[in-house]
């Protein structure tokens, strides 16, 4: 069964940095685009960033553009999100999600990792 | 930028009743890229509907999706206790995604 396992969340001060990882298993990782989606406390889902299967194309929400960098290592079946210049409003559970090839929807999700930005 | 507006914000119903959730786009969109998800606290979001009307793998047939253009609907024909959750519609665009703000389906 497809599995996505996030890690790297934690408590960080405003202005700090954090790198999230998502290890994928039971599918050919390089064949799929991937994304990060977050949910702030008491809020809805927000798409954060996406990357193509080869890693050659990347996309960002305006709220994180210039601060976050998405990348992937297909040899390690791992997706990353480098988060710099963190703000209180970046506090959220971060999910990695696999994009279905046909419908462009997210067909598998990880359980999420919590990022808390606070002094 | 296309905005998805879901209504109602909260829907209070009893098990066995029919639920109708709405998702309206600020301009006409391709139904091929309209999806619905169910989200429960502490769990990963669960895909329900792809392409506006195709059920995801393992989704019971009491869930159905419909619509085109700017108006889309998720219908749950007979609510089961496990169906009470928050529901989101989502749209894929040229290079970005947007979610609706969600509808909370609560037990009356």
Image (tube, grey):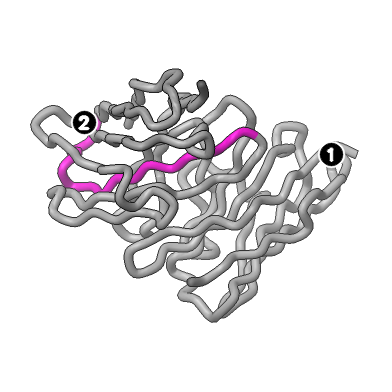
Magenta stretch containing residue A37, yes or no?
yes
Residue B81 on image: x %, y %: 77, 32
Residue at image location 34% in from the left, 24% down from the top: A5
Disc 2 chain ID: A
Q: Gap in Å between the C-alphas at discs 2 and 1?
A: 41 Å
Depth check, front residue: A13 or A20: A13
Tell me whether the residue at label 2 lies in contact with that at label 1, contact meaning CB atoms closer than 8 angstroms. no
Q: Residues within 10 Å of mark 2 (few under 14, many from 20)?
A: some
Name the residue tied to disc 2.
Answer: A78
- Residue A40 locus on image (x, y percent): 57, 37
Say which chain tag 1 marks. Answer: B
* Residue furthest left as drawn: A75
Which segment did they paint magenta? A26-41
Q: Is residue B75 visible?
A: yes
Q: Which of the pair B74/B58 is nearer the observer?
A: B74
Is residue A118 toward the left or the right of residue B8 in the image? left
Name the mark on residue B95: none
Q: Residue at the location (77% across, 53% down)?
A: B9
Q: Residue at x 48, y 27 (%)?
A: A117
What residue would you read off at disc 1? B15
Q: Quadrant of residue B85?
A: top right
B50 to A55, vertically: above or below: below
Tell whether position B76 is magenta: no
The quadrant the C terminus of chain B occupies is: top right
Q: Residues within 10 Å of mark 1 (few under 14, many from 20)?
A: some
Would residue A21 be found to the left or right of residue B74 on screen? left
């Amino acid at each position: 069964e497809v599995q996505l396992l996030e890690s790297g969340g934690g408590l960080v001060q405003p202005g700090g940095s954090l790198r999230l990882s998502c290890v994928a298993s039971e599918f050919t990782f390089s064949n799929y685009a991937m994304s990060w989606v977050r949910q702030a406390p008491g809020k809805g889902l927000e798409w954060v960033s996406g990357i193509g299967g080869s890693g050659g194309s990347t996309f960002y929400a305006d709220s994180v553009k210039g601060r976050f960098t998405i990348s992937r290592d297909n040899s390690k079946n791992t997706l990353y999100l480098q988060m710099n210049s963190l703000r209180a409003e970046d506090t959220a559970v971060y999910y990695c999600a696999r994009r279905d090839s046909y419908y462009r929807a997210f067909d598998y999700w990880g359980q999420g990792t919590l990022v808390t930005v606070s002094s | 930028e296309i905005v998805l507006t879901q209504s109602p914000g909260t829907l209070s119903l009893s098990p066995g009743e029919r639920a109708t959730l709405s998702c309206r786009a600020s301009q006409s969109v391709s139904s091929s890229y309209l999806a619905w998800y169910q989200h429960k606290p502490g769990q990963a979001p669960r895909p329900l509907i792809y392409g506006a009307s195709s059920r995801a793998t393992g989704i019971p047939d009491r869930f159905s999706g419909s619509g085109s253009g700017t108006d889309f609907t998720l219908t749950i024909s007979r609510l089961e206790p496990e169906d009470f959750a928050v529901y989101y519609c989502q749209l894929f665009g040229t290079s970005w995604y947007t979610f609706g703000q969600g509808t909370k389906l609560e037990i009356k």
